[in-house]
Each structure stands twice: as C-alpha cells, then as structure tokens.
Amino acid sequence: MLWNACDLVVPWNDPHRDLDRKLAVAPEGLRVALRGDEIVGTVMVGYEGHRGWINYLAVAPEHRRGGVGRRLMDDAQAWLRQRGCPKINLQVRHGNDAALRFYEAVGFKVDACVSLGMRLEDDTTEQAMGRRDG
C-alpha cells in the first residue's frame, strides 16, 4: 500500500479502516494521482463547515520532487474553496521535517496551538503495526 511506502501507517491508525470510513462518509474528498494505472499519490480532504482538513498526503517515493504533491495540494485547496472553506488545518508528526518543509513551501505556517486527540475506537491491527503486505 502506498501509505506504508510513505511511512504514514502507525499502530493506532488502520489505513484500511480509514479508507473505508472516508469512502463511506465523503468519497469525493479522496483525491488520487495516477500515472497510467499506477496510484502515485493520495490526499484525503475534509470540511466540516469550520475548517478544512488534510490527511494522508502521500507521494510514492520514486515519484517525489516531480510536482505530484504540489498538484494534490492544489487540488485539495480548490476542492475546499469550492465549499467555502476559510482555512485548512493539518497535522505533522514530530520529527517529520521533510513534511514540514514541503508544507511550508506550499504556503502553510505553524499555528500557535496544541493538537489534542482522543480515540473513540481502537484501530490497532497487525497491518497498522508494520505488516507491509497490504
């Protein structure tokens, strides 16, 4: 799975469940970049009326630095603008300096806030804990 190759999978997020949830709730917010029949990038976009959210921005390692990520972000921003979204939020894990540099290069700035979270469902699975056969 692309998200494994991009190191987006962590033990507490099952990417298959996340994908199923997105497709059930707002499939139009799943944006995919293709080269022929190959998926080379993805981004999940959401908007709840107050803020837009970006999740699972991923570009296959062999297709990075060719504009795929920037085009996905442009598409995500256009999708959000069409819905009247005033601001986009996203989260980057500590230590992911390459992602921070990318987001800053496309116009994001670090907000002066703390991100809090609470699990409502335990998604911990073997897949999310490192099996890379998905």
Image: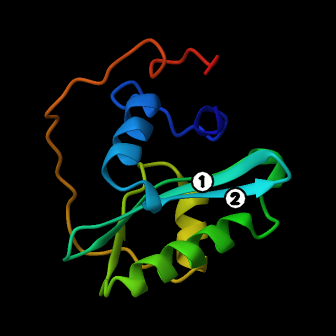
Q: What is the x, y in percent for residue 55? A: 43, 55
Q: Identify which residue is drawn at 82% across, 66% down.
A: 66
Q: Identify which residue is drawn at 29% across, 87% down.
A: 86
Query: Which SS class for mark 1?
Result: strand
The dot on residue 33 is 2
Q: Is mark 1 in CB contact (under 8 Å) with mark 2?
A: yes
Q: Quadrant of residue 98?
A: bottom right
Q: Amino acid at mark 2?
A: Ala
The dot on residue 7 is none
Residue 29 relative to residue 114: left or right: right
For the residues labelled 1 and 2, the Cα–Cα distance comes to: 6 Å
Disc 1 packing (10 Å; few <14; some 14–19; many ≥20): many
Disc 2 packing (10 Å; few <14; some 14–19; many ≥20): some
Q: What is the x, y in percent for residue 6? A: 63, 41
Residue 118 relative to residue 17: left or right: left
Give the camera-side residue of 86 and 97: 86
Residue 50 relative to residue 25: left or right: left
Give the camera-side residue of 94 and 11: 11
Q: What is the x, y in percent for residue 71? A: 67, 73
Mark closer to the chain start, 1 or 2: 2
Report the label total. 2
Quadrant into which the N terminus falls? top right
Q: Identify which residue is drawn at 20% across, 76% down.
A: 49
The dot on residue 42 is 1
Query: Which SS class for mark 2?
Result: strand
